[in-house]
Amino acid sequence: MTPQDRRYTKTHEWIKIEGDLAVVGITDHAQESLGDVTFVELPSTGQKVAQKGECAVIESVKAASDIFSPVSGVVSKINDDLESSPEKINTDPYDKGWIFKLRDYNKEEYETLMDAASYDNFVENEQ
Amino acid sequence: MSFISNTADQKIEMLKTCHVDSINDLFRDIPQNLAPKSFSIPEPKSELEILSFFKNLAAQNGSDLTCFLGGGFYDHFIPAAIDALVSRSEFYTAYTPYQPELSQGTLCATYEYQTDICRLTNLDVSNASLYDGGTALYEAVQMATHITGRKKIIVDISVNPVYRKMLKTYANNLSLELVETGKGIGLCDRENIFSVLDKNTAAIILQNPNFFGFIDDHSDIVEKCKSLGILSIQSVYPVALAIIKTPGEQGFDIATGEGQSLGIPLSFGGPYLGFMATRKEFVRKMPGRIVSRTVDNHGREGFVLSLQAREQHIRREKATSNICSNEALCAIRAHIFLSLLGKKGIRDLASLCVDKAHYAMETIKKIPGVKVMDSLPVFNEFTVKLPVKTTPVFEKMLEQGVSAGLPLGNYYPEMENCLLIAVTEKRTINEINRFAMLLEENICQ
């Protein structure tokens, strides 16, 4: 089930509002397509990111893929656990597999993103 | 059977499909001033003619000279076993296999080569090799700019001038800022270095032993760089590493060097061997391929190419480097060389070089008017200042069958009286004595 409490991008990231911060990760569909994740190159905290800007890289046994920020903002936290356990992206993409958190993020940009139903529909049509 | 795959008819058909009349029409977009004036090449030659052509060309190499020439490339002894082993077709024909895991023997040898380099440099990881010492140094620069996101590179003039020229050529059309430090013969210029280090600096490049032959401990510079988030790169002479303080012990982040001295013959233009090692934290930014040891699904040991996501065929424009190959055969030569010598053998070799170089220094010091730069420790190479210009002396000695060293004026105009002399384990006491005698005679003339 695609969680209802967040928004989605066409590049298969999710973004969820938690208080003042916006949490970003990749979708279950994305982790499924990538295969076993072996390494995550995280952004640095304090880094400014633009909407659709490259800010992380996920390496899997199949490929290396860029992660694009769903909205613009400033990286305030990164998920250090992924350095030693990148497989969390596979096992728990919507919770423990989060990648980074943004502060001062752009709320209008967030509103333009897909909700769970639209994303499911998008994935279905993409295949 | 014709080995030319396209028949005349097929060519006409293909041209028709492309809507052009002739093959030349395919090159119409190239402006006239850039197009080759002609494609005329000499008539074909027979096998016999080709053999004699290349024999004459090869004869122009001074292969029977008594060699005191160094400057980054050294006349070390090469055991016959190396040629015999690398000539085995399993090694000789497999360049970079496109399904590399099929070539377990090549991968195993490369893995062992990487282990050699890690042990020599005292760093965590080595790649499968690079083209030569100069390109390896450039790759280290690229690595440092990727890691730090900075563009300024400090390089001391005691780093091999050939490498510095290569760096300049590479950096020419990139947004890299190369800053040279240092004044003249001696250790790298700390005062000057410390004055140019800043928060925009990606890396510093030093060499040990440096180009003038001096051995240094750069730990203080490395420490200062670390406090400013600057990466430190050391270019090294692998034979010397057997007995001098290693890049790892001095705290360096990246070590590179020329591997020619490890069983690879001296020849004009190579092929030579670039090596590179770094700390584990930077492994994903290291260029080239890395062979790893693993187990298959039956638990059997095997070797694989790992971390390939950094490479061009997967990462495309985001690859760490455009290096997607390695100097496989030369790396295997280096591995055989080091295996034959072993841990003790390489130390003995290094000590022999030191002893003979110091004997040569003492002998040359007795020549009136010659000043040996011996105020600082050296490995197997040292600088002397002659009372006359070096080049004519060097040329006369060439005629007498001795390659006297490297006239430093070629690279440092103010040093036209200076000669860089290298002494390897191959030089005998008689050769060194004759060298000193000829040097004295030619200076006096």
Image (cartoon, coloured by chain):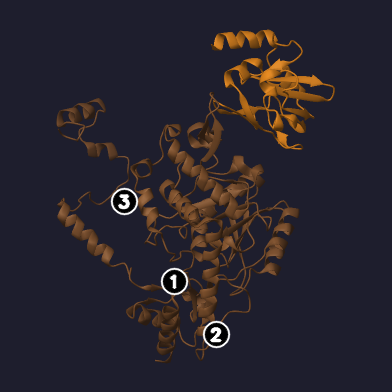
Chain colours: A orange, B brown
Q: Which residue is mark 3?
A: B33
Label 1 residue SS? loop
Say which quadrant the N terminus of chain B sits in: top left
Q: How far apart in space, not on screen, are marks 3 and 1 (Cα)?
A: 42 Å
Counting labels gives 3
| Left or right: B406 as drawn, with respect to A103 | left
Q: Chain of mark 2?
A: B
Please report whichever mark, 2 or 1, sits nearer to the chain's N-terminal start: 1
Residue sitting at x 48%, y 33% = B313
Q: CA distance from mark 2 to mark 3?
A: 53 Å
Chain bearing tag 1 is B
Residue contact at pointers 3 and 1, CB within 8 angstroms: no
Eye-nearest disc, 3 or 1: 1
Given residues B379 and A54, the one toward you in this image is: B379
Residue B9 placement (x, y as % from top left): 15, 28
Q: Tag 3: residue type?
A: Asn
Q: Nearer the viewer, residue B433 or B348?
A: B348
Front-most of residues B83 and B189: B83
The kind of residue tagged 2 is Lys
Question: How many angstroms separate mark 2 from mark 1 (CA)?
Answer: 18 Å
* Residue at the (47%, 58%) spot, across then down: B262
| Mark in front: 2 vs 3 | 2
The residue wearing badge 1 is B69
